[in-house]
Image (spheres, coloured by chain):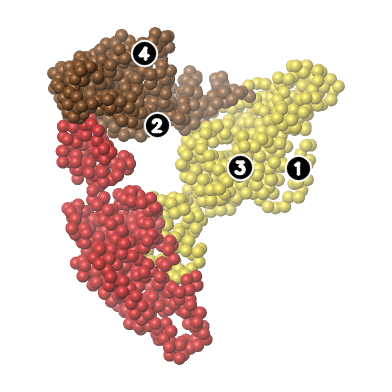
Chain colours: A brown, B red, C yellow
Amino acid sequence: MHTDKFTIKQSVLTNSAGEKMYALAAEMFPICRSITGNGVRQSLDIIKKHLPIDINEVPTGRKVFDWEVPKEWNIKNAYIKNSQGEEIISFKNSNLHVLNYSVPVHKHVSLDELRPHLFFLQDQPDWIPYRTSYYKEDWGFCISYNQFKTLTEDVYEVFIDSTLEPGHLTYGEYYLRGAVEDEVLISAHICHPSLANDNLSGISVAVFLAKQLEKMPRRYSYRFLFIPGTIGAITWLAVNEKNAAKIKHGLVLSLLGDAGNFTYKKSRRDTAEIDRIVSAVLMASDSKNRVIDFIPYGYDERQYCSPGFNMAVGCLSRSTYGQYIQYHTSADNLDFIRPEFLEGSLNMTVKIIETLEANQKFLNLNPMCEPQLGKRGLYNLRGGNNDSKEFQMALLWVLNLSDGTHSLLDIHVRSKMNFDIVKEAANSLLEAKLVREIS
Amino acid sequence: MHTDKFTIKQSVLTNSAGEKMYALAAEMFPICRSITGNGVRQSLDIIKKHLPIDINEVPTGRKVFDWEVPKEWNIKNAYIKNSQGEEIISFKNSNLHVLNYSVPVHKHVSLDELRPHLFFLQDQPDWIPYRTSYYKEDWGFCISYNQFKTLTEDVYEVFIDSTLEPGHLTYGEYYLRGAVEDEVLISAHICHPSLANDNLSGISVAVFLAKQLEKMPRRYSYRFLFIPGTIGAITWLAVNEKNAAKIKHGLVLSLLGDAGNFTYKKSRRDTAEIDRIVSAVLMASDSKNRVIDFIPYGYDERQYCSPGFNMAVGCLSRSTYGQYIQYHTSADNLDFIRPEFLEGSLNMTVKIIETLEANQKFLNLNPMCEPQLGKRGLYNLRGGNNDSKEFQMALLWVLNLSDGTHSLLDIHVRSKMNFDIVKEAANSLLEAKLVREIS
Amino acid sequence: MHTDKFTIKQSVLTNSAGEKMYALAAEMFPICRSITGNGVRQSLDIIKKHLPIDINEVPTGRKVFDWEVPKEWNIKNAYIKNSQGEEIISFKNSNLHVLNYSVPVHKHVSLDELRPHLFFLQDQPDWIPYRTSYYKEDWGFCISYNQFKTLTEDVYEVFIDSTLEPGHLTYGEYYLRGAVEDEVLISAHICHPSLANDNLSGISVAVFLAKQLEKMPRRYSYRFLFIPGTIGAITWLAVNEKNAAKIKHGLVLSLLGDAGNFTYKKSRRDTAEIDRIVSAVLMASDSKNRVIDFIPYGYDERQYCSPGFNMAVGCLSRSTYGQYIQYHTSADNLDFIRPEFLEGSLNMTVKIIETLEANQKFLNLNPMCEPQLGKRGLYNLRGGNNDSKEFQMALLWVLNLSDGTHSLLDIHVRSKMNFDIVKEAANSLLEAKLVREIS
């Protein structure tokens, strides 16, 4: 197994969240996933060991908006043998070798006949590219350019032992009830084969975020989706069309295990609360983090942000498509992601959720002039260090802007003060009964 | 005739649009136009050889809002002779020599008496300035500073053989019906004597734009005005006050024959569709083009954008007033404008009109998630060159934003994609019945 | 008296407004003011010699929103004597020596017992800091660091001959009726002892602004408040809660006697008319002037801009808190402020008020096309210097934008023309009956 080198790393894992997430990714890495089939089922079974997800199956042919659920794809083996019977390309070495969703094939072909079915990267001669052919029946092999160069005129046996038959599209869902029915959606795609950053990192962070949220008090309810990209999101939206209106905020998680700084791609709404929250958290964390505009391309925010839904769902990643050359190649492997980056990503998502949860509006109950903070022990009469001066200012800002229209995020933005100190000030004023929450 | 040198150039003109426009300007150049009189009539007669315009006459004394149509001015001859009877300043050499709209005069004067009636440019000693006296009865001569310096103490015979009598104000109008009654106004002033860039270039471009539009399918109806500046626009608006509401967009054309980059002066509305269209077209064409804010000074946009009308009419020119020293002098002649610049201006106005015509809104008929482009042949499954990738993005943008509120211009602005590819994508989606036009 | 050195300067004062304001500040300087007590009364009596203000008294214990009017504080004498009976710190030398609002004390203490009651500035060893203890009963002395360093182990007699008893809070108010009931509030605090820039400069400028306004035609009514900071503003607002709605614009005046450029701190509304007016006037005057955002800290704008009032009240100062090291020390004395700076401040406030008074909306009575300015003598037919060209443009701008929605300030901003020339143009058009005022 080509994953042997990773098992060594797994053995030294201790119990940090980053290492647990890495181990989960490593466990799922060898599985050959696609948009349908047993690869997704096996992956969801592994997730279920961590999180009590529901596993849903939608039958092939089911009409989902403009699409329909495709056939189920499963694969047992695949290879190319030369005329000496040597297996020169083998699915067992890497499931990327097979054009994903390939129809079955078994025949003998000349090099000329084979060549149109071969995909490789001339610029990265050691890497195997990842290619799919979901919506056009085709077969093919993805190989390194160095492998390609060794091919001579010969008669090759090509064998792809796959099935494409009526079955199901499978996805996982996990719902975590909060104080209100308004939902936050967390969505990760689960349709890529042995690619670590692109799909496994997002899945792992989503699983461990869910585990953290289970332990936290929650204003919002949370819905986690582990779904095949595009057709999975479309299927879920079609099946749950009425529920979609409950989703008030959301994040697509992907590409969260590499060393890059964070990138947040805003929702189509551009200034939704989730957009403003994530921007504030990212910018407060590191000025090298980036916030980019919505474009109707990328992960499943494409579907969530289609005009008929227009959900407030953005996409959080570290590096993005086009920013790293390992994208959609065999180099997006378990060496490319690191426990510490997964852990940083988890912490960032937790911080985002905490900020979203905390972003309430308060009403100043003494709006005529300032209340007398001194008699409530909230005023440092003389002297005081810088921390207490900053806290004084935060109290004054929260009092001044808590007129029913400003959330703590608004106050944070206008005051240019750290969100956490604004939140702390609001809590002190709440305790002192100088403000009350607005529902 | 001082225009001899230009006739040589005319003889070598071939049949390009630029050369035809230049020839039209050259034909009109020698005529002594003013705000009323036969100069305008002769010019309109020349235009009528190209375009079936209506020629309208409004009688002197007709009340037009706060103004009234002035007397008709005509001139046969004018000169200054010295005591030796030599014609030292002669209308035959340049019609600019006479203060435009000058009352008749014939008398003998000393140099001291003559001086207050002489206009010259010390900074440009070879050039004759262009001066008018429409609303104060006066007579005068415009001469070069070099001519002025040769004047000695003498008795001068001044003779201006003009008439200022009840008559008419004359203007030309051309209406081109489109699919809807909503109109686009194209307005050019026709009151300046031998000035090439300032009035003849705008007239020529307007004439040839009309000829192009005649051949194009048109959503909008088009109204072309060839009118004396200020009083002509006021007269037209007074006579057609009710029609003005049909005008949804408009351009004043002027100063379009010189080598300068384009300048668009926005309408008073600042963000009218025409303002956004022209800005987009100019910026996409050359970053040295300029878009400037509305000011209530300039050409007839002053009247169209008066607060009672507040029409969405901007002004397109190349160089603008104050940007070139030849402005309102004898140096604004047929050497100053060039066929290639007139042709560039025509092309720019056509591009603007095409963009305005194309700037429709569409409605995505599958707004829930993306439609499946592949089954309609609109999706390049694998590979594909950059052009096709760009077209894919344009399809996605048009689908994503065609929610009933975004025009193609809005999509162009938000996507930062070329307007033409956005338009092409919309057309493909229209053919595929994935969007429909919103009227 | 430590103010002897200033009396020399007073003797050379002539009659400029700046010198009169300086003399007023100098007369009030020696008085020991606090938030209540005779110091405020004496100061208001001095103001009353210039302006017929009403002096109001609100009794101790009166509930004012979340606060109550505190006890009245008065002080006769205070000192620290060493064991030799030498008065080493004496209230007679500077009223800053006593912790303002100190409870009475008379006892003998060791240096260790004395130390927690001493306040000094290590960084400015010659200066006495200004400290208060309004809302926590305490006694103390403020001394220079050099004085502090001379203190040895000894038995010290500390004596503060103050009283803290039920009495009144005292403030001055002056109302100047205008054509309409809408009010402009001018507020200055009057609670600081011998501090020249911080309180006396604002009081002096407010007094002389009132005297100027008495002589000017007034559209607005004006209300001047001379009040103790914080509790005085809160008391006034509580007593006059219903009147507050009449206040349409307002300025807190403070720190107006030093050499710094002007600073305007905007109201909480951020874009209120007063904010836009003061910004325009300050920017037109000197690009080194500053306009800063509202923060809920500072002078009494904190109360006027509390969310329940949200009045359009900003704060005008020269240097601001934190910008100058003399703030709240004995170095903020009569040497720190200068007649010429007070006069500049007065002129700036007058300019602001003139601009506010002039900022009306007009309605163009000939909104269809331009009116004919020439027949009304408003058009410079030929030539004309730059001044007249600028005036022409101002006429056109006022005509073009006087559609009922634009004030002269709006026209000034959009035209980028000087406010005064815009105002002059509006006046000319008013005289010519081309526009009328909109009430």
Q: From the viewer's perspective, is A59 left or right of A11?
A: left
Q: Position of residue C331 (x, y in %)?
A: 71, 36
Residue labelled with disc 2: A291
Circle 1: element type: helix
Q: Mark 2 lies on which chain?
A: A
Place residue B173 in its image quadrant: bottom left
Q: Position of residue B429 (x, y in %)?
A: 19, 39
Q: Mark 4 lies on which chain?
A: A
Residue labelled with disc 4: A5
Q: Which of marks 4 and 2 is nearer the N terminus?
A: 4
Mark 1 or 2: in front is 2
Mark 3 or 2: in front is 2
C-alpha separation, residue under disc 3 versus residue under disc 4: 70 Å
Label drawn at residue C6: 1
Is residue C61 visible from the viewing direction of this image?
A: no
Asked if labels 4 and 3 touch by Cβ distance under 8 angstroms, the answer is no
Instruction: Say which amino acid is labelled 2.
Output: Val
Mark 4 or 2: in front is 4
Residue labelled with disc 3: C318
